[in-house]
Image (tube, rainbow, N blue to C red):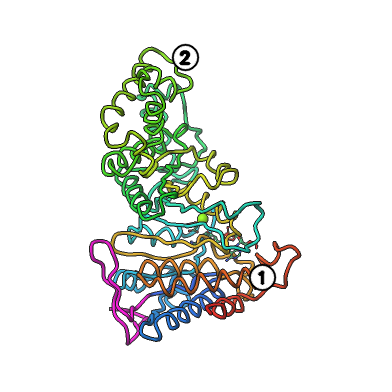
């Protein structure tokens, strides 16, 4: 079955039932060490995870690690350009839950991202990246503890599908010619627009099914959160990209108000209901004026449309959601992408789950991690319906590779997410406790040490792992 790797001789497979993992006491879990700083981070992570599991379950549970290869290490073992060998894909498919370090992607040419390839091959459609603050972590922000968000990023489509043509390529030029001479002129709304003849071309597909399965998962997650955090914000740049990012927003609302009608209220619905609660005799038109500040300047058709919207909301959900009942529901709202970048800095406590398309989520997860201490504190998970691969938000940080210096916190916390996904909450809690105590005690790697006032002497990557274990208690 495998060409160059051998699974551990002890341990069992994790299986899936109705999209949930069924985990034996001794699961076999494949891991990819990763390029660059993976060489430092992975051993530290493995040590912390093993110690937590051993302590939490007194040796009754144990992970059997199965080393699989991707990136530079894979080329060393399997030969030139064998960046993602079949052995690795077979192992991840077979064992269902895996964890990985970062993998390098060259800029402007060369291989396409192995990280993205894994997400697409295993249909890991939700990239889940929580950004929360650990007490004592230094941050450039005044109130980093106010940020507690989970970026829920669509993980398989958008421009990450990687369908693009190089400037000057034969097919790229043909495509530009067809667009300029046939398709754009046949689309009246595009007027006389033309694509520059020396352009590279990329395709941005955003599908209804892809958007809705992501939002569905985000809403299900919100249902598990404490009441005050039951909110899903659809992040988009739909004012500019109307039929891709704008459609993502519309499909998100459509899903929320159909599949989760009884559990959700949209922000606009909450305004309409709230207006009637404050003034039970309010007319439909007055209510419409209050939810749309520019109402009086609108055309009669637009005004009629908004009045109709008010009427429909009141007729359809007043009984189930009115009289303040909507305050107990999940709030679904939307924000334009550029605005959300400033909002998470200026009003972080107003947000909880941020449901995004692929590119926006990539940017937003680095930005949110920066607020709570940087990329050393940014864990993540790529989740599908029958497979999950855990990995940090950050990349290979090549300038720090092999120095036993980098912060392993993000991959360790990705391991915590994996333990929680497996239902091994006691082990996950031990690691969170140990990591929190190490940070609060000023036992941190260079990235956090340099932010502490006055700066403290940094621990090595491996020493930070030991400090976490020491603080298990
Ligand atoms: N999922 C994956 O595997 C990902 C892979 N990549 C790939 O990684 C490569 C390098 O990308 P690059 O843009 O440099 O981004 P990186 O995220 O690798 O690093 C950028 C900077 O972020 C800080 N940083 C990153 N990781 C940590 C950490 N664990 N602890 C503390 N600080 C950290 C460092 O800042 P400083 O030096 O200031 O301390 C580092 O120089 C590229 O090939 C890229 O494609 C990128 C993202 C994700
Ligand atoms: O695959 C890569 O090289 C980069 C991916 C990335 O930045 C991310 O998923 O956050
Ligand atoms: Mg990224």
The reply to whether the magenta stretch includes residue 318 is: no
**Toward the viewer: 202 or 339?**
339
At x 36% / y 54%, what residue is drawn? Answer: 221
CA neighbours of label 1 inside 10 A, class few (<14), some (14 to 19), many (20+):
some
C-alpha gap between disc 1 and disc 2? 58 Å
State the residue at coordinates (59%, 46%).
345
> In the rendered view, would you say 143 is above or below 206?
below
Disc 1 on helix, strand or loop? loop
Residue hosting label 1: 442
SS category of the residue bearing label 2: helix
Label 2 neighbourhood size at 10 Å, few (<14), some (14-19), many (20+)? few
Looking at the rendered image, the quarter that the N terminus falls into is bottom left
Q: Is residue 244 left or right of residue 320?
A: right
Q: Is residue 333 visible?
A: yes
- The answer to which quarter of the image holds residue 439 is bottom right
Horizontal and vertical percent position of residue 174:
40, 38
The region drawn magenta spans 1-29
Report the residue marked by disc 2.
Answer: 297
- Closer to the camera in the image, 38 or 129: 129
Q: Name the residue at the right extreme.
A: 454
The dominant secondary structure in magenta is loop
Q: Earlier in the sequence, mark 1 or mark 2?
A: 2
């Amino acid at each position: 079955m495998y060409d160059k790797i051998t699974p551990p001789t002890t341990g069992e497979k994790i299986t899936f039932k109705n999209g949930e993992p069924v985990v034996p006491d001794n699961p076999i879990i494949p891991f990819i060490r990763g390029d660059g700083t993976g060489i430092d981070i992975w051993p530290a992570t493995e040590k912390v995870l093993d110690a937590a599991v051993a302590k939490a379950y007194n040796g009754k549970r144990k992970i059997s690690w199965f080393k699989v290869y991707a990136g530079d290490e894979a080329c060393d073992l399997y030969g030139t350009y064998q960046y993602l060998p079949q052995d690795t894909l077979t192992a991840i498919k077979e064992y269902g839950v895996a964890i990985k370090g970062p993998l390098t992607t060259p800029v402007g040419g060369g291989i396409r991202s192995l990280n993205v390839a894994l997400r697409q091959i295993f249909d890991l459609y939700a990239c889940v990246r929580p950004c929360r603050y650990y007490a004592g972590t230094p941050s450039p922000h005044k109130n980093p503890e106010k940020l507690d968000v989970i970026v829920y990023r669509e993980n398989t489509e958008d421009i990450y599908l990687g369908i693009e043509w190089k400037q000057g390529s034969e097919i790229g030029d043909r495509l530009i010619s067809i667009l300029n001479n046939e398709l754009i002129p046949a689309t009246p709304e595009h007027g006389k627009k033309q694509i520059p003849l020396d352009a590279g071309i990329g395709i941005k597909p955003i599908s209804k099914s892809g958007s809705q399965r992501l939002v569905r998962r985000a809403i299900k997650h919100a249902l598990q959160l404490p009441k005050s955090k039951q909110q899903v914000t659809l992040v988009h740049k739909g004012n500019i990209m109307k039929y891709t990012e704008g459609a993502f927003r519309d499909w998100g609302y459509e899903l929320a108000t159909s599949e989760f009608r009884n559990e959700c209220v949209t922000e606009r619905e909450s305004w309409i209901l709230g207006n009637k609660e404050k003034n039970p005799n309010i007319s439909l038109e007055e209510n419409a004026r209050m939810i749309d500040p520019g109402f009086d300047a609108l055309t009669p058709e637009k005004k009629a449309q908004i009045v109709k919207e008010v009427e429909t909301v009141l007729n359809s959900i007043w009984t189930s959601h009115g009289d303040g009942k909507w305050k107990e529901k999940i709030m679904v709202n939307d924000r334009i992408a550029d605005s959300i970048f400033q909002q998470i800095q200026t009003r972080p406590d107003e947000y909880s789950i941020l449901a995004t398309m692929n590119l926006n989520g990539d940017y937003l997860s680095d930005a949110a991690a920066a607020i709570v201490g940087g990329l050393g504190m940014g864990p993540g998970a790529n989740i599908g319906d029958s497979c999950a691969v855990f990995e940090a938000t950050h990349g290979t940080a090549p300038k720090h590779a092999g120095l036993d210096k980098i912060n392993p916190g993000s991959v360790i916390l990705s391991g915590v997410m994996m333990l929680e996904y497996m239902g091994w909450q006691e082990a996950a809690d031990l690691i969170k406790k140990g990591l929190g105590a190490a940070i609060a005690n000023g036992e941190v790697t260079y990235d956090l040490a340099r932010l502490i006032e006055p700066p403290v002497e940094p621990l090595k990557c491996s020493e930070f792992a030991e400090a976490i274990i020491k603080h298990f208690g």
